[in-house]
Image (cartoon, helix red, strand yellow):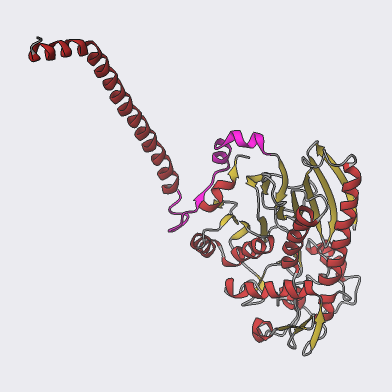
Amino acid sequence: MTHPQSQSAKARKKADPFAAIKISIMMISIIGTMAGWLVLLNQENQTAAVSTAVSDSNKNAVTNATIVDVDINQLRQVNAAPAQEIQVVARTRSSR
Amino acid sequence: MTTNTIDQTTAQLATIKLFAMGCHIQISLNTKTLSAQSSSIDQQITLLTRDIEHRLAYWAQIFSRFDDQSELMKLNSRTNQWVEVSSELFEVLQRAIDFVPKTQGLVTPTLLQPLWAAGYKHSFETLPKSPKLELMNQSRVSFDLDDQSDLQDGFVAYDFNPDHHSIERIQQRQADGQYQVYLPEGMALDLNGYVKGWCATKLAERISQSHDWQCPCLVDLGGDMAIGVPKDTDLVTWGVAVAKPYCDYSEHGNDEDVAILKISSGAVATSGQDYRRWWHGGWQHHLIHPHDLRPVASDVLTATVLTSDTMTAEVYAKYCVLLGVKQAIAWLNKFDIAAILIDIDHKVMTTSAMRPNLIAG
């Protein structure tokens, strides 16, 4: 007849190799998730700083407005890829 | 009316160019869905062009203010009585009237006489663009050298009565299939800006929805544009450049752009005091302020508006010029309207609602 305490000890011995692997996987997952959030937060902070800088530089020109003075050079830097895909077919201007 | 060219610029894009109703017209057709259907796209484009020319000629007979025999000018000459008009004129006039309260009365169709007083009585191409040319034009007609009033301020003696321009005095009625308009004495209508937008939309709808082709298209009437979208088809994205304001009457053109827009539906229009300017005892332009009945002195050089239909875009663009930069900005922000303003210092301002449509130039 097998003693219950020895049976438990045997069961714990069998589980040990897998437990270590599981713990390692869990720690790697936690570390990876935290790293990902840190990267995202860092990107958002950088983006907010650029937007604020553009708006601040134009406060004197436009009061209480969300309109932003647009430098044509800024337009050329933004979304350069779509310009290559869309063909300009017309030009809007004062009545001709 | 002259058909200049029919260009097949790419395998999927065809272009029709015309000159009608006093403006340059360009119609871009996305023929991607047609190549499998028609063996002769050029022939079909020719037929479509004839159809468009016919419609433009018909509308010119209704709306031209430079033809005394047009329906509009006959209406202007028959005040204080009910006059039967076409459904087209009735519709455009009704929409023009609807815009008046939306623009605080600044954009109104009742300013033909102040426009004449400013010297814009004939087509723009005939107007003098310099003092020398004005004197040359005047020397061809009887000219009273003792009357200096015209030379001093450019305006003839004019009945300055604001009641004559009150929109509430216009009446419209429809009965038994007849459309009738009552213009009070002293009032004369100019529907030019409204008509361009209306025609652009009608042509776009015709080409994309009721024509045999049902072809995606972009209709450009002198810079006012409508996008035609066929039913049950994927949207086509069109690239539209926003031109730099016109600087002078140089022969070398002004094709620089301040922005590029991507548009899949709706309309875009630009209004401004940069191009339609002429010399009449001083520099005049066509945007009359209804309060003093003179060309507006505004710090907005041009305004470009993107919205659902072309007439609305044209009216709102004109409204921005009449308001001036500060009030225009406040109004555009309040109603979240996509717009680009260029002031008289050539500073470019863009509303946040326009940004999704902006791409690099």
Query: In what quadrant of the picture does the C terminus of chain B appear?
Result: top right
Farthest front residue in view: A1
The number of callouts visible is: 0
The magenta stretch spans residue A84: yes
Task: Provide residue B18's location: percent of width, then percent of height.
Answer: 85, 53
Q: Is residue B95 magenta?
A: no
Q: B210 and B321: which one is in front?
A: B210
User: Measuring 60% from the left and 39% from the top, which residue is drawn there?
Assistant: B360
Q: Position of residue A72 (x, y in %)?
A: 58, 42
Which image quadrant: the N terminus of chain B?
Answer: bottom right
Q: Please state if B122 lies on the left or on the right of B355 as rendered.
A: right
Compared to A29, does B263 lie above or below?
Answer: below
Q: In the rendered structure, which segment of residues is drawn in magenta? A: A58-86
In the rendered structure, the answer to whether residue B322 lies left or right of residue B137 reads: left
Residue A89 visible here: yes
Give x and y (percent) for residue B144: 85, 79
> A6 left or right of B185?
left
Vertical side of A3 occupied by B180: above or below = below
Image quarter of residue A16: top left
| B339 to the left or right of B69 | left
What percent of the width, then of the height, locates residue B224?
71, 57
Looking at the rendering, which quadrant does residue A33 occupy?
Answer: top left
| Residue under the image location 64 percent in, 74 percent down | B98
B107, B220: nearer the viewer: B220
Q: Can residue B152 be spotted in the picture?
A: no
